Image (cartoon, rainbow, N blue to C red):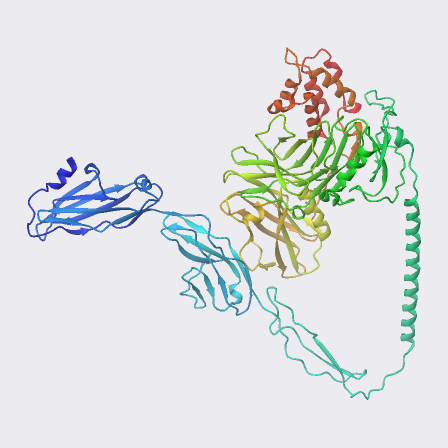
Amino acid sequence: AQQSATVANPVPGANPDLLPHFLVEPEDVYIVKNKPVLLVCKAVPATQIFFKCNGEWVRQVDHVIERSTDGSSGLPTMEVRINVSRQQVEKVFGLEEYWCQCVAWSSSGTTKSQKAYIRIAYLRKNFEQEPLAKEVSLEQGIVLPCRPPEGIPPAEVEWLRNEDLVDPSLDPNVYITREHSLVVRQARLADTANYTCVAKNIVARRRSASAAVIVYVDGSWSPWSKWSACGLDCTHWRSRECSDPAPRNGGEECQGADLDTRNCTSDLCVHTASGPEDVALYVGLIAVAVCLVLLLLVLILVYCRKKEGLDSDVADSSILTSGFQPVSIKPSKADNPHLLTIQPDLSTTTTTYQGSLCPRQDGPSPKFQLTNGHLLSPLGGGRHTLHHSSPTSEAEEFVSRLSTQNYFRSLPRGTSNMTYGTFNFLGGRLMIPNTGISLLIPPDAIPRGKIYEIYLTLHKPEDVRLPLAGCQTLLSPIVSCGPPGVLLTRPVILAMDHCGEPSPDSWSLRLKKQSCEGSWEDVLHLGEEAPSHLYYCQLEASACYVFTEQLGRFALVGEALSVAAAKRLKLLLFAPVACTSLEYNIRVYCLHDTHDALKEVVQLEKQLGGQLIQEPRVLHFKDSYHNLRLSIHDVPSSLWKSKLLVSYQEIPFYHIWNGTQQYLHCTFTLERVSPSTSDLACKLWVWQVEGDGQSFSINFNITKDTRFAELLALESEGGVPALVGPSAFKIPFLIRQKIISSLDPPCSRGADWRTLAQKLHLDSHLSFFASKPSPTAMILNLWEARHFPSGNLSQLAAAVAGLGQPDAGLFTVSEAEC
């Protein structure tokens, strides 16, 4: 009311014949980030000026007023300024646009200024449409669409060609449409480049993913040469070359023959009869045919003999009576009192099912001759004996149920990415060498009286359809263990690598399992595990250990919670061992920092005849939507020439982040100026845009330098892929039982399994251990999974002995006793 009174009673002194006239009016402005904006009004003659915003008067104390006198007319002049903050605009955001205007008074009346609209400026991150890579022929038109991100004020668009600004005023062959598309009227070889759409306004500047445009030239024949002179064989010839133009940048080769021959005597040339050379040719062909027939007969004979050996139906009777022999456990040594000697169990009934029995190589085992039975078991076609305490009908129903699971039945046998073995209650271990993947089957995990054939398989991500939602990414290999549905009385431990940088603030990690119907479901959210859950996970810096009582197909998936979430990528540089041409290829691999991905790349390079030329590096790839770039620099132009058509190569962000491709690679092709050139010195950069990067300094002799060849020598992972019984464990069985019986009962002095977990840095899992019948057994099982085969048994013995138990001296063991 006070303000209204002040406005209604203007100060006298103005010319009574003039209404206020605005010299300065407020204009539309944008608020950038949190900076307030200034609105200014100036009028003459004016005795009062006030701002009104969205229909409400601005408080008088918020006005900054300056009074003066116009020098030419002598009339009173007033200038008023106010500040508008982001908070004021956001109060009405979404309801209507925020506006302000001035109202000026004189003794003759009032005048209103134009409305000034105040808007909050922004520019979203994602382009509505990004340019895509193209391959076009010479003189063909090119259209690269670009729809910039939504923003206020609307974004201006410009285009970059290999990071240089495209200026249509300097190149009449190029123009930019109103819809911001870049158009090249007729493609030239010089138009081969990386094109990037850039959107910018007063808030930010955004770059699209680069689109590689390659202009190729299809080859065309030159005119035919003149006919040659007529030869002794009564023919002459003519030739042409694929050089008018020659194919370039992947263009098609010329179609047709480059040499044409014709009879040059109009069929009147006299041909001589077959000489001795023709007779020798025919005799040689007949001799080769006879040799092939004899070789075929020998192969048929060998095949028939092998088939006779497989058809004999003989089974060693020791399978029916020994609980130890069928799984090929090493017999106990006379000088080792800690190994158990298992007596035959004659109380169990015996049932048979079709499957394969894989004899172990770590000790004497009976010989089994397999029969050609009907394929009921997904793991093979032989017959072996299954000890089971239930009737025969139950075993047949169990096997029949397993045989209906299609994804289990399709597992590849005999590959380097699969291992399997036959196990009983003594447990054992399966390992896929050089992958970091293993399955620990603790003692008593398999019920007594039963024998299971268990497999462990590594799948390629491209062979398994794992749906990923939102920002999820695959962090581990996809691993199967089975058969699904078998009864386990203790959790087994599946160990596998992962490439995530574990951080509770950056990642939400989930364990996925594939159901029998083929769909994937989340079975565990790491950090939110329930102690009584069927699944549990111990996550470490580069590996995870999954406790599970149900076998199946598993994968570790992560969802980024912030841009700080990062995956570890391993960078490898390979080149040919021998260079027989002028061209020399350097292959740069970007792969998950896991053993299985490394193994696959090493095997691939062995087939290609490649060698490692630099020490591997690790790059932290962040969830920032920025691509990975690779470039080569400082190539000595007097010795080498780079054949790269653009300044850098680029791997899109999503190709790396979704994790469905374990490794990606780019090739840099260099050409030697002279065949005698053998020394190569250059730099190769790999970096994420606005992120982490690595630089390789290459300096070696391509003909004889092999100093990095041994860096990736594959290490043995503890012998055979399948270990059964006591040989699969570092801790002797009797000592293990003594530790369990001593530490499982609660101790008033704290010398029980809880203290052991603290000494082994496993105290964060106490609730899970406590939910199991034997917490100490869970701790020892996890120790076995983490430290086999190179674990220090003396350190474990020291930790147990330090608990202060009266019989702690019994636990002191040496490596020789194992």
- Compared to residue 814, the image places residue 400 above or below, namely below
Q: Residue furthest front?
A: 393
Q: Nearer the viewer, residue 22 or 681?
A: 22
**From the image, which quarter does the C terminus lie in?**
top right
Lateral position of residue 564 relative to residue 100, left or right: right
Lateral position of residue 337 relative to residue 713, left or right: right
Which residue is pictured at 19% across the width and 40% down the height? 64
Say which quarter of the image contains residue 789.
top right
Lateral position of residue 340 relative to residue 252, left or right: right
Residue 762 can be seen in this image: no
Say which quarter of the image contains residue 775.
top right
- Compared to residue 6, the image places residue 176 above or below, namely below
**From the image, which quarter does the N terminus lie in?**
top left
Q: Position of residue 159 (x, y in %)?
A: 45, 58
Which residue is pictured at 63% across the width and 31% down the height? 537
Q: Position of residue 333 (x, y in %)?
A: 86, 24
Q: Nearer the viewer, residue 649 or 112?
A: 112
Q: Position of residue 91 (x, y in %)?
A: 32, 40
Say which quarter of the image contains residue 415.
top right
Residue 154 can be seen in this image: yes
